[in-house]
Amino acid sequence: MDYRKQMIVNPGQKLRLKDVDPAFKGETHESATQELERYRQKLGQLQALLYAEKKHSVLIVLQALDAGGKDGTVNHVFAAFNPQGTSVVSFKQPTPIELDHDFLWRVHPHAPPKGGVAIFNRSHYEDVLVTRVHKLVDKSTWTARYDRIRGFESGLRESGTTIVKFFLHISKEEQLARFAQRLDDPARNWKISESDYAERALWDDYIEAFEDALAATSTREAPWYVIPANHKWFRNLAVSRIVADSMEELGMAFPKPTVDLTDIRRKYHAAAEEERRDKRR
């Protein structure tokens, strides 16, 4: 199954999230577990190529409603990446200094360098979602921001950044069940807040905001994918497969050595052999 074709938000497409089953699972749990491990290994190999070649970079955007699984995706999928070449950034409520600047001012410094992967766990899209739902900006402002976002991402793409954006789609019932797990699990109590429940009253407003934002900003250069995420194991497989397939298309290769390997072997291998012989005497 080609998850990219199945889950992509096509440019210009009118998106209706109610038509996407958040409980969809295209695999059995057992087969998905095996496939996920294979794709995690592939992600590690692809990142090694990316880091060594230093011609491309990768930006992964994760958005979801509360308890949608952004942290879990980072932990279970992107732990396959070497931390040395990976950054994870979360854009939450802007600081007073950030509010004094253009809304993208705080984002651009975190774009990935050549050879690097950046994961945005919440992103610049907060400024067309939360700000809209809570009426912090008017309609003319958040609609104009769609153009700014498309331009920003187009610029990154022109500089060699592959952009892959995921909306992790859970049902309202699944969200409530995950909140209950947080209440019952001492290791997750810290994640719960009163605002989590208060925001549920705005569920329909958030869904509408996501539908509009994803439809307006899914482009060929920076596509959005809607991932059915009620089943965490399927979510992890779908995300890992889409990222791996997107990176594989870069056609990366390890760079050629910058030294004469024959000379290195002649000089140092011979010396090492002599050293081993001396130790055996």
Image (cartoon, rainbow, N blue to C red):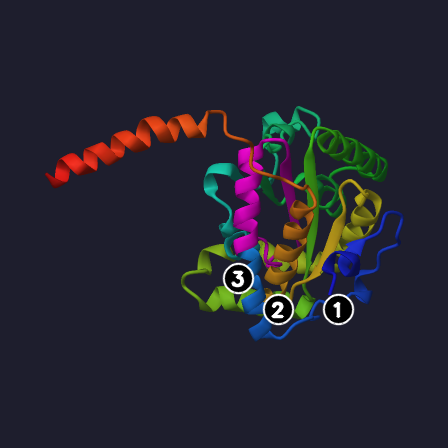
The C terminus sits in image quarter? top left
Q: Which segment did they paint magenta?
A: 41-70
Q: Are marks 2 and 1 in contact (CB under 8 Å)?
A: no
Real-space Cα separation, disc 1 to disc 3, in angstroms: 25 Å
Residues 227 and 19: in front is: 227
Residues 161 and 93: in front is: 161
Query: Disc 2 marks which amino acid?
Result: His
Real-space Cα separation, disc 2 to disc 1, in angstroms: 11 Å
Real-space Cα separation, disc 3 to disc 2, in angstroms: 17 Å
Secondary structure at numbered mark 1: loop
Q: Quadrant of residue 35?
A: bottom right
Residue 132 is situated, as x and y percent measured from the top left of the image, at 76, 44
Per the image, the residue denoted by label 1 is: 21
Tell me the residue at 53%/61% (across/down): 37
The N terminus sits in image quarter? bottom right
Tell me the residue at 50%/29% (across/down): 257
Q: Is residue 37 left or right of residue 237?
A: left
Residue 200 is situated, as x and y percent measured from the top left of the image, at 67, 60
Q: Please give the count of numbered marks on the rendered protein.
A: 3
Q: Are marks 1 and 3 in contact (CB under 8 Å)?
A: no
Per the image, the residue denoted by label 3 is: 37
Q: Is residue 201 left or right of residue 86?
A: right
Secondary structure at numbered mark 3: helix
Residue 261 lies, with reference to residue 205, above or below; the image says above
Whether residue 63 appears in this view of the structure is no
Residues 25 and 127: in front is: 25
Per the image, the residue denoted by label 2 is: 231
